[in-house]
Image: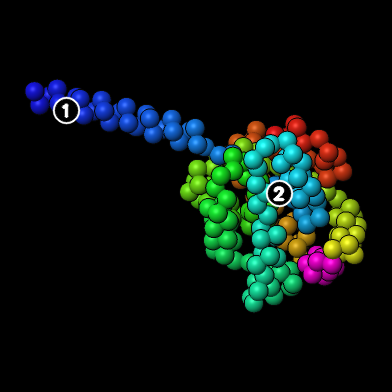
C-alpha cells in the first residue's frame, strides 16, 4: 500500500511540475537589447520596434536617469560619468515591476559595462524575460558628432556638450566590443548588426 501511495505522490508531483513549467513558458516575456554609441539612433530603432511589436516597453536608462536626476546622479550625468551598476539595477528592476503587463521589453543603455551583462541577466530572470535579440548599431564617429551637435541645438541636453559627448564615446568604444563578444559567444544567431544610416527596416533583426 505504501509503495502505491508513494508512486501516486510521485505522479502528482510530476504533473504539478509539468503544469508549472508550461505556465512559465506561457508567461515568458521577450527582450531586445540595443547596443550603440550615443546619438547612434537607439531611440529611433526602439520606436520602430514598438511600431512592429504590440505591447512593447522601451526601457531607456538614459531617459529614466534624466527624469529622476537629482543630487549625485545629476552631477554624474552632466559630467559624462557612469552611474553605478547597483543603482542602474535597482532603477530598472523597479521600473519593470511597475510595468509588468508588457510582453516585450527593449533595453537601451544597459549593459554599458561588462559587469552590467550579468546584472541585466538577473533582472531578466527575476521578471521571467527571455532574450530575443541583441541589436548592435554601427555608426561612424563623424556621423555621431554631427547628430550630437544637431540634437544639442534642438533639445539642449546637458550630456550632449562636446567634452561630455567625447567621454561617453570613449567609454562606449572601450566597453562595447567586450559586451558584444559575450553575447556572440553565448549565441551568435541572437546578435544582429544594423547600420545607423540604414535603420528604417528593422524586420530582419526582429
Tag in front: 2 or 1: 1
Give the extent of the magenta segment.
156-165
Where residue 104 appears, as percent x and y from the top left, is 62, 41
Label 2: state its secondary structure: strand
Q: Which residue is mark 2?
A: 35
Examine the residues drawn in magenta and state their main secondary structure.
helix
Is 100 positioned to the left or the right of 21 in the image? right
Residue 157 lies in the magenta stretch: yes
Number of marks in picture: 2
Is 198 positioned to the left or the right of 13 in the image? right
Where residue 199 appears, as percent x and y from the top left, is 82, 40
Q: Label 1: how many residues lie within 10 Å, few (<14), some (14-19) or many (20+)?
A: few
Q: Is residue 89 above or below residue 184?
A: below
The answer to whether any part of residue 91 appears in the image is yes
The residue drawn where x is 62% and y is 37% is 132
Q: Which residue is mark 1?
A: 6
Q: Label 2: how many residues lie within 10 Å, few (<14), some (14-19) or many (20+)?
A: many
The residue drawn where x is 12% and y is 24% is 3
Residue 155 lies in the magenta stretch: no
Quadrant including the N terminus: top left
The residue drawn where x is 50% and y is 36% is 27
Amino acid at each position: 500500500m505504501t509503495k502505491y501511495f508513494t508512486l501516486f505522490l510521485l505522479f502528482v508531483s510530476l504533473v504539478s511540475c509539468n503544469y508549472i513549467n508550461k505556465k512559465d513558458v506561457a508567461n515568458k516575456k521577450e527582450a531586445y537589447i540595443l547596443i550603440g554609441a550615443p546619438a547612434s539612433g537607439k531611440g529611433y530603432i526602439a520606436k520602430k520596434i514598438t511600431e512592429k511589436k504590440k505591447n512593447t516597453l522601451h526601457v531607456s536608462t538614459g531617459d529614466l536617469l534624466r527624469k529622476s536626476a537629482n543630487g549625485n546622479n545629476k552631477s554624474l550625468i552632466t559630467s559624462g560619468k557612469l552611474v553605478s551598476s547597483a543603482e542602474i539595477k535597482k532603477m530598472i528592476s523597479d521600473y519593470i515591476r511597475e510595468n509588468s503587463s508588457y510582453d516585450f521589453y527593449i533595453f537601451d543603455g544597459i549593459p554599458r559595462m561588462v559587469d552590467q551583462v550579468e546584472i541585466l541577466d538577473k533582472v531578466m530572470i527575476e521578471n521571467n524575460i527571455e532574450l530575443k535579440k541583441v541589436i548592435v548599431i554601427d555608426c561612424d564617429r563623424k556621423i555621431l558628432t554631427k547628430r550630437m551637435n544637431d540634437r544639442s541645438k534642438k533639445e539642449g541636453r546637458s550630456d550632449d556638450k562636446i567634452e561630455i559627448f567625447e567621454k561617453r564615446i570613449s567609454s562606449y568604444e572601450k566597453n562595447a566590443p567586450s559586451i558584444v563578444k559575450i553575447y556572440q559567444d553565448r549565441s551568435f544567431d541572437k546578435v544582429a548588426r544594423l547600420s545607423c544610416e540604414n535603420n528604417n527596416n528593422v524586420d530582419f533583426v526582429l
